[in-house]
Image (cartoon, grey):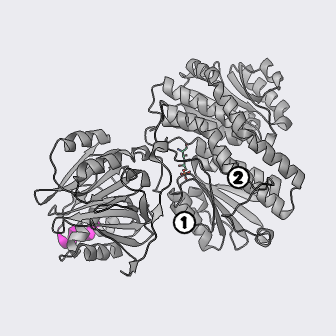
Amino acid sequence: MCGIVGYIGDKKATPIIVDGLSRLEYRGYDSAGIAVFKDNKVQVEKYEGRLSVLADKVLEKDYNGTIGIGHTRWATHGAPSDANSHPHTDQTGDIAVIHNGIIENYMKLKEWLIEEKGVSFKSETDTEVIAHLINYYYEGDLLDAVFKTIEKMEGAYAIAVVCKDEPDKIVAVRKDSPLIVGLGKGENFLASDIPAILKHTRDVFLIENDEVVLLTKDRVTIYNELRQVQAREIYKVTWDVESAEKEGYEHFMIKEIHEQPKGIHETLNRRLNSEGIIELDEIKITKEDLDKINKIYIVACGTAYHAGLVGKYAIEKFAKIPVNCDIASEFRYRDPFIDENTLFIAVSQSGETLDTLAALREAKRRGARILSVVNVVGSSVARESHDVFYTWAGPEIAVASSKAYTTQLTAMYMIALHMGLTKGALSRERYDEIIAEIGKMPEKVQSILDDFTDIQHLAGTQFNNESVFFMGRGLDIDVAMEGSLKLKEISYINSSAIAAGELKHGTIALIEDGTLVVALATQDKLYEKMLSNIKEVKARGAHVVAIAKEGNKEVEKSADTVIYIPDTMDELAPILSVVPQQLFSYYVAVARGCDVDKPRNLAKSVTVE
Ligand code: M6R
């Protein structure tokens, strides 16, 4: 996803910007560019490809500018190319703009600029329109021209602008796309994400929606849309950039898989009081509020959606409230039935996923109470929610989610238990029993991680498959969906997950000699049924890898390989059964030589529809 970095101060801007952009590489991008001052001109350099392509070209040139903006682009309007990369300039080349997000009415604006103003465009992007509009309104005051421009723009965006005639300022705007300002002494920074500037400062202003920021080297002024100056408290960043680095692991993904015991422990234990009761200070939903809630929607995308599916099961089981779990991009267009007795739970690692955010806004507009389960503190989803449950997974850099998922599961169980106890739907005894078992999860996950070599070996024998099927019943199908997504997104193997009972209704036609089937059989109630499903696919020639609980040895009679997870209650098995699937996907992707942390066509934070 696109990244923004800006610098204004006394140091050379180029190395600072390039370094900042490198901290955002994990978000996914296909081109990069900068605009800095040289010899009283705004110099723009931008190239398709990795940031190193840009870095090689610009770092050797002696740009003396101490002000500049830089961008990593993830293509939306117009294919990845040098011309479509940011920054974009107006016709004079004096005004340069970088932009995250989408300008929805850009076609209308573009036609007007071409027909009425005779502007000729150099790119296929929506962003270029912004540069030309600013030029159109520019009468010696960049801030004023930007204000006039954004009045004409519809959509979601964060932008940063520099202008040759005002070489002592950067103007930036946030509308539904993240933007922060880093505060230094005699220098200031701008970025779409905190890690980009953390090397330089821990003092940050979080810019709100519809705010415009004017940065000079000594001052940062924030304006609302009425051009009134806004006061802002400094947000002190307490986490360390070190934790966002690989610490000796070959990839972020495997590092993050190994960080799961810690993430689960933190998410749970930081909220348990001395009597073992979950205290959710961040959630202000009272018993009276809960008694009124007659319906819950859990809405999310990708992995977070898969965590939501388990959340649905847990809330219905422990709190006895009906739950729908929806894919965010579908939810907002299907006219869902929502009123003030509806609780809407958004689940998102980044807190910036546009589909989730848009669904949240729609639910809020219709009167729902919004609770979010989010990893990134201060993200848009968190800020727009009434109540927030932060998963303390720490920064997740790999595009493929792992520790975010298991901490989201932990969060969903905790919310379900909290609701169940508050409503009186769950006995204290049962509640204590489940909390105690969640408390054992870090150790149990660790034991699976310690035995990784068997899974690594299995991946070494199976990495050449063209397609893989995952199957399960009950909660196992929810986790099989996550296993399947993991495998396809990082190894590019065509995989799908099916409810095992559905096999006979179609999918079994695809099973032939050697087809790899990963069968989850962790649910005691459904174990016998799963054994029958395994036999069904074995009879058609499938190669079956089963995931089962320790002690359930019967499965060895029909599966080719069995991966055991530690014994646990059925309800909590997803936290464990996902781990061998994450490891399998990771080692398969490594064996296939894939770019594990940055899979093709994907981005970490999907801030476009
Ligand atoms: O940041 P979010 O949790 O809202 O992201 C949602 C999905 O884009 C994300 O989970 C995606 O599916 C991951 N690449 C899966 O590994």
Picture residue at 86% right of the left edge, 56% below the top: 426
Q: Position of residue 167 (x, y in %)?
A: 18, 65
Residue 53 visible in the snapshot: yes
Does the residue tagged 2 have its C-beta within 8 Å of any atom of ligand 1?
no
Residue assigned mark 2 = 412
- In magenta, the rendered stretch is 110-118
Please check the rendered image and state whether residue 112 is part of the magenta-colored stretch, yes or no: yes
| Observer-nearest of 502 and 264 | 264
227 over 187 or under it: above or below: below
| Observer-nearest of 409 and 281 | 281
Picture residue at 82% right of the left edge, 52% below the top: 317
Residue 76 visible in the snapshot: no
- Find numbered disc 2 in the image and state the secondary structure of the residue it sits on: helix
- Find numbered disc 1 in the image and state the secondary structure of the residue it sits on: helix
User: Along the polypeptide, which appears first: circle 1 or circle 2?
Assistant: 1
39 over 561 or under it: above or below: below
Secondary structure mostly taken by the magenta-highlighted segment of the chain? helix
What's the CA distance linking mark 1 and mark 2? Answer: 19 Å
Residue assigned mark 1 = 383
Callout 2 amino acid: Met
